[in-house]
Image (cartoon, rainbow, N blue to C red):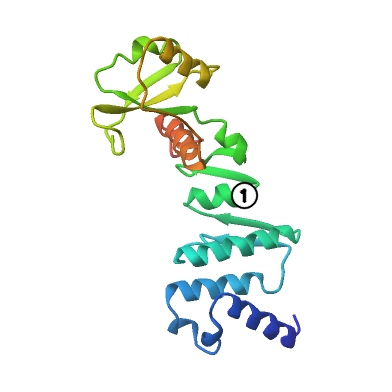
Amino acid sequence: MPAGEARKRARAYLERFGLAEAGRKKIKALSKGMAQKVQIIAAIVHEPDFIILDEPFSGLDPVNQSLLEQVIREQAQAGRTVLFSTHVMEHAERLCDRIILMARGEKVFDGTVEEALARVPRQILRGAPADCDLPSGLGAGGALERLEDDAGEEEGAALWRLILAPGADAQGVLRALVDAGVRLTRFEPRRAHLHDAFVALVGEEAAGPAKPAAEEA
């Protein structure tokens, strides 16, 4: 880039990231979060077609994480490809068109966020009196698990998680419970998130047989 244009864009980005006063400081004099923002600015200021960011949200507070998400969206909307690594699934779920999930150094999933979420069993959270016989009113709806954290439930009620069976309908389960006379204090279909997909997919990988580290020819 021409030096004048580079300085102009750099000043604009420094202002946007709240670093205008640090424009003439050396990187080693900056905090981790400030230095992280300078590195991001250096990566995008010349508007490359392909941007690679390694853990770009590390060291940033929630306000600056939100700002960086906005900047990444702008780069994508301008037709540029952004590839980034992250351990925070919320960022990937909000920003990515496609994701790759890794476990034990190998790829366990490659596809869209929607395809990853489809791999998570559907769940329902429900509250009911602790002494009621939920399984008899469950039918073939799925597997039932009592949760230890009953915070927020009314006195004498317990919180349960139902993993819906394939093809089971949440409304059908609700109808079966009502017909069985179960008094519900909560019935809450739970939307899956990418964090759930990661745990489910990596859990499957971890549960599988260990592969040899190397084989002799």
Report crowding for label 1: few under 14, some 14 to 19, many 20 or more residues within 10 A (C-alpha): some
Between 203 and 115, the one lying in front of the other is 115
* Looking at the image, residue 70 lies above or below residue 31: above
User: Where's residue 17, x and y in %?
Assistant: 56, 75
Q: Residue at x 58, y 70 (%)?
A: 40
- The quadrant the N terminus occupies is bottom right
Q: Residue at x 36, y 21 (%)?
A: 144
Q: Can you tell which quarter of the image residue 12 is in?
A: bottom right
Viewer can see residue 215: no
Tally the marks: 1
Viewer can see residue 99: yes
* Looking at the image, residue 26 lies above or below residue 114: below
Q: Residue at x 58, y 44 (%)?
A: 100
Q: Amino acid at mark 1?
A: Cys
Q: Can you tell which quarter of the image residue 109 is in?
A: top right
Residue that mark 1 sits on: 96
Name the secondary structure under disc 1. Answer: loop
* Looking at the image, residue 139 lies above or below residue 3: above
Q: Residue at x 51, y 49 (%)?
A: 90
User: Where's residue 95, x and y in %?
Assistant: 60, 52
User: Where's residue 118, x and y in %?
Assistant: 57, 31
Q: Can you tell which quarter of the image residue 211 is in?
A: top left
Please give left or right for residue 118 compared with residue 7 in the image. left
Please give left or right for residue 140 compared with residue 2 in the image. left
User: Where's residue 169, x and y in %?
Assistant: 53, 18
Between 138 and 103, the one lying in front of the other is 138
* Looking at the image, residue 89 lies above or below residue 179: below
- Toward the bottom, the furthest residue is 24
